[in-house]
Amino acid sequence: MLLERVGVEQPHERGRVDELVRPLELGGETLAAVVGQGHLPDGRCAVLIEPPRVEHVPGQLGMLVGDRPRVLDLFCGGGGCSAGYARAGFDPHGVDRFPMPAYPFWSIEQADWRAVLADRAFVRSFDLVHASPVCKGYTPLRALSSAVHPLEIPEVRDELERTGLPYVIENVVGARRDMRDPVLLCGSMFGLGLEGAVLRRHRLFESNVPLSAPGPCSCGDGRPVVGVYGTGGGWTRTAPGGGGTKVSGPAAAAAMGVDWTVDQDVLSQMVPPAYAEHVGRQVLEALGHSSAPPVSCEAGGAA
C-alpha cells in the first residue's frame, strides 16, 4: 500500500526551509526529503516534506507497488480524486504538469499526460486511468480573458481508449458537449456542506464502466448554498438568484470533506473526494474487486 503524508495541514512552500534534514528511503530508493518540522497550532507534530518531482521516464514503474488495485490520476492537482479513489480501495499515482506540494500521497510525478500515456508498459501497471482535463475552456471564465484555453477532452478520451483500460473523465458542467453520457454528481448527494448550507459543486463523470449517481440532486431544495472558488476570502450573497456563502481556507476544506490541506488555491480547483470515492467503488465492483470500508464524511455538512 502506498505511504501517505499525514499531519501536514499546510502545503510546503518551496524555498521556505533551506536545511535538508534527512531523506526518507525504502529499499535504498529516496522517496522524499524532510525539509523541516515543527508543530501545528493544535500541538500536533508536523513534518514538511518535498516529494520527488521528476519528468516521466518511459519504462519506469511507480515508486511503490502495493497489493491494491492502482489508479493513474492524470491532471491530479491537489489530490481530491486521488484521495477519493484511495478511500474506495485504490492505490493512486498522481501526474500533473505543475508541482503539486499539497498532493497527499507519495506516488506523484510532474510530467505531461501525453508522455505518461505513451509509456504503454507503465500504463498497463494500472487498473484504472482517471483524467480531469483543464476545465477553464469549458467555463464562463473563458470570456474574461483573450487567452485561448485548450478543450482537451476529445483528445484525452482518444488516448484513454487506446490504453484498453477502464477510464474515467471528470469535468465541469460546461463540458457536457464534449462528454459521452456523463453522470452528474453534486455535494448534496454526499451530505457535503457547512453549518446547514449545502455544497453544490456540480461535476460530470464519464466512463467506459457503467456509472450512476447515489441519488437525486437536492441542492435546490431551499437550503443556502456554500461555494468554494477563487483565491480570495469568504462573503455572503443576498442578491436575486438566491442566498449563498463563499468560504475559504479551513471552512472550505470542511465543506468539501478535505482533511489534508486548507490552501485556497488548491481547494478552489479540487474535486471533493467523496465524488471519486463513489465512482471508484463502482469501478471496483465492475472489475470484481472488493472496495474498502466506507469512510464517513466529517465535514459538518448539510443533512
Image (cartoon, rainbow, N blue to C red):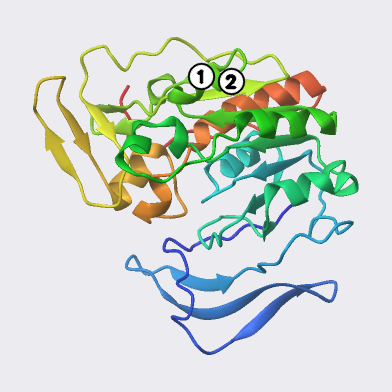
Q: Position of residue 102 (x, y in %)?
A: 50, 58
Of 193 and 40, the residue lying toward us: 193
Of 256 and 237, the residue lying toward us: 237
**Circle 1 Cα neighbour tier, 10 Å, few/some/many (<14 / 14–19 / ≥20):** some
Q: Position of residue 18 (x, y in %)?
A: 50, 88
Of 59 and 189, the residue lying toward us: 59
* Mark 1 and mark 2 residues within 8 Å of each other at the beta carbon: yes
Task: Classify mark 2: helix, strand or loop.
Answer: loop
Q: Residue at x 44, y 39 (%)?
A: 136
**Viewport quadrant of the C terminus:** top left
Q: Position of residue 94 (x, y in %)?
A: 66, 50
**Circle 2 Cα neighbour tier, 10 Å, few/some/many (<14 / 14–19 / ≥20):** many
The residue under label 2 is 179
> Taking the image as drawn, is residue 291 in sight?
no
The amino acid on which the numbered mark 2 sits, given as a three-letter code, is Met
The residue under label 1 is 176
Of 103 and 69, the residue lying toward us: 103
